[in-house]
Structure formats: C-alpha cells, structure tokens
Image (cartoon, rainbow, N blue to C red):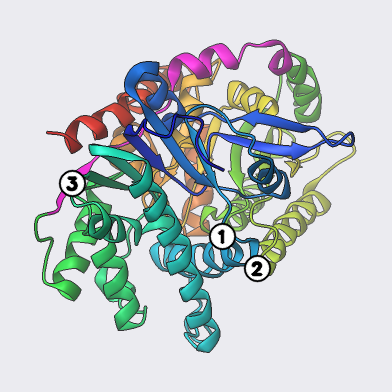
Amino acid sequence: MASTRGADQKAQVLVASNRGPVSYEVREDGSLHAKRGGGGLVSGLSAIGADADALWICSALSDGDREAVRRGVGERGVRMLAIPADVHADAYNGIANSVLWFVHHMLYQTPLEPVFDAEFRRQWASYETYNRAFAEALAEEAAQGASVVVQDYHLTLVPGMLRALRPDLRIGHFSHTPWAPPEYFRMLPDDVAGQVLRGMLGADRLGFLTRRWADAFEACATAFVGGLGDTRVGVHGLGADADFLRKRSHEADVEERLPTLRAEIGTGPDGRLRHTIVRVDRTELSKNIARGLLAYRELLASHPEWHERVVHVAFAYPSRQDLAVYRDYTAEVQRLAESVNDEYGTPDWRPVVLHVQDDFARSLAAYRLADVALVNPIRDGMNLVAKEVPVVSDEGCVLVLSREAGAWEELADEAIGVNPYDVTGTAEALREALAVPAEERAERTKRLAAAATQLPPTQWFLDQLAALND
C-alpha cells in the first residue's frame, strides 16, 4: 500500500514497526472496516503536529490488511507493506518470537532447545527479506536528512540496511524487550549474533527501557563486534498515561463491569468485599502466571486464616496462540486455576477468578478493586501493568513486583520485591502485602503512581526524537 502523500512529498519523521496504528477486516458485504489503535507511538506522532510530514510504515498482518493493500485503501500518514504471508510468518513467528524473544527473555530449555539447523537458516533468510522490505520503504519515503525511529526486535537489521541505502538519515532504534547478557546472547550462531548487532549499530542512537538492558547491549557489542562505534545509547523508561487511564477507568463500560466483578469476588465472613490479589497479563511465557498461581495456592495452604477472605483475580489473555508452546502454556494456567478452586473452593467462595477472554474494560475494573497487584515476570522489558494499577486503584494497592521486571528500577522503593522463581517467597510476599493497613496502602499507591507516570507515552516518544536530533 502506497502512502497517501503526494509522489513528491517526502516524510520528515518516520516510524517503522511490525504492527501499525490501524488494522482492517473484511465484512460480510465485502466492505473494509478500519480499526485504530492507541499507545505511545500514536500519541507521540500526534503530538508533533499534523504539519510535521510524519509517516508510519508497518506490515500487513491479516487477510483484511492484505486486502486493504490490494485495493489501495489506506489512511493518511500510514504505509502498510504487503510482505508475503509466508515470509512474514517465518520472520515474525519463526525468528522474532521463537528465537530473538526467547534469547532476550532467557527462556530456552537448553537441554532440548534451541536447534539452529537448516530450517532455522531458511527462516532467517525470511527475516532478512522482511527487514529489507522495511529498509527499502523507509529509504523511498524519507526526505533528505529525515528522522527515522525503528521499533523493537522484529526489525533489528533495518538500521544497518537503511544506513547503506540512505546515509543522510538520522536513524534511531528502540528495544521494548530486555537485552540478553553476552553469555546468553552467544547462544545465537556467531554470524547471526554479529548480524543482529551490526544491524542495530547502523543506527545513530539506540534506546532501551532501562539502564540494565542498555548495559547488556553494550556488553554484547563489546564482546562480539568490538564496541559501539559511533552509535549512542540512551534510556527512556516508558511510563503510564495517567490522564488516559483515570478517564478511561470511569467510563460507562468499566462501571458496568464492576458489579459483575464484585459479585464474582463476593463477600467474606465480615460481610465486606473480599480482599483481591489482581494480575492482568497476556499468556506470554515470560509473564510467569503459572508460578503466581502456585504461590497463591501455597498462601492458602500455609495461611488458612485467609480462606474465604481473599480472591485471586487473574486475567490471562491469550497471546501468540498460533505457536504450540503458547497454547500449552495457556492450558496449564487454566488447569492450575481449576486445581486451586477444586482444592480450596467452597459453595460460597471461588478462590481464583480466571478470565481468558480479552476485555480491557474488565481489566480496568479489576485495577480499581485491587488490594494487591501481582506482577512477577521471569524477565520483562518494563511491564506497564505494574505502573497502571497504582494509577487506577480506587482504595490503593500494594505492588508485589518481580526484581526481573524493568519497572523494578523505578518502583522498587514502594514495591515488595520477589524472586520470580521462588514460589514460597512469593507466597510470603502476598501475605505481607495483604496485611498492609489501608492507610499505608493508600500512601504507597500515591508514591507508586507518581513514579509510574514520570515519562508518559507522548513525552517518551518526543524525548527519543529530540535525543536523536541532538
């Protein structure tokens, strides 16, 4: 899909990402329906003004997207690339999500995986093709000396490819994930590890969510390709959008869900709404939902005084269900929730309220009711849920937070930290959090919210753009 700008009009600011700000579906009558997305990049591009000649380049992800490209349907400021579906599948699922994601989150079961064989090499060639399509589109659309901000592990090769095509451009890349330390990153084949690093180092500036991830990248660059060269590295800790969240969490659809959620939680022996331990996650392997459920079960086993008085509200929304390992993980989460309810539940008390149907309004309702927020990822670039719950919570909540989440760097002073692998330690942290008096809980929440909103999404993007052009 060509962009809607004129043939001689080039973009001064460009964003490149796998997923764009709009998606399409084909309705029964054959018409196309466009759905707009949100987030920091959308807000940031809006903030620079309509006259800034901005362009977002993204991939067609669905049949509806590809049909929109075929028909030449598009939105101003967006160019969607019709990368062949099989190439995209290899690049996105085969390499980005099944290799690079696993490396940076250190998730491999190394006795059996990874296996870098001929099939991997075939998929890697698709990843190169996919990245090259973005680089060529950016080179075609960018004005002389334009600023380009490339997003995430899907597009690690783009900066280097684009630099070769357009040395006049200011090129940035931002990583939304952790970065693996050298001893884990070296798991990749030597040539592939070097290709990823040299691709990234084609940028003028690289951005990371925390200093820890930036340091890990610098260590890899030093170990494998001799250092950063002329590339600068910066840290931009994406914060929660307080204004949006506070307004959105009191809209009609959220208010409508509150009575149903309160009924699911129920009242304890004292006639009051039961205490709530809330988690909201995608069923990504890094989110550690299964150990969270095991910790909650251990809390009930070791502290029977909490029976009938607490409910674990766990929203585990399906993610990447086209990969078998994610389907299996989602099934295990459901099995564990059912086992806790079977073991401890009574006719009047369901200890775990689990929902796997994605519902943002219901998530916000749960945020508002949270006494404790459980965020215990194995490893996470940031984790915005840890920042969002304190902003939305009605009565205040205690945050139980993994020390392996990027958000730990900013929220550690007011959170209860846990080792994500330590089920017993997490159970004790949950008990400690439940025991925090209401007044202290409210004060903690104010301080958490202040720390969580220091760099809201719009400013996060604009800061990167300013640093790139400094």
> Residue 84's image quarter?
bottom right
Alpha carbons under labels 2 and 1: distance apart: 9 Å
Where residue 382 sits in the image (x, y, percent)? 39, 43
* CA distance for labels 3 and 1: 40 Å
Residue in the picture at 80% in, 29% down: 264
Q: Which residues are magenta?
A: 231-255
* Residue placed under numbered mark 1 in the picture: 285
Please report the residue visible at 58 percent of the width from the left and 52 percent of the height from the top.
Answer: 82
Q: Are marks 2 and 1 in contact (CB under 8 Å)?
A: yes
**Residue designated by label 3:** 168
Name the residue type under label 3.
Asp
Q: Quadrant of the C terminus?
A: top left
The outermost residue toward the front is 8
Pointer 2: what residue?
325
Q: Earlier in the sequence, mark 3 or mark 1?
A: 3
Q: In the rendered view of the protein, which quadrant contains the N terminus? A: top right
Tell me the crowding category of disc 2: few under 14, some 14 to 19, or many 20 or more residues within 10 angstroms, Cα based. some
Query: Neighbour class for label 3 at 10 Å: few (<14), some, many (≥20)?
Result: some
Name the residue at 64% across, 61% down. 85
Against 360, is 67 above or below?
Answer: below
Query: Does the magenta-highlighted stretch encompass residue 239?
Result: yes
Mark 1, Cα crowd under 10 Å, few <14 / some 14-19 / many 20+, is some
Residue 140, given in percent of the width and then of the height, sits at: 37, 46
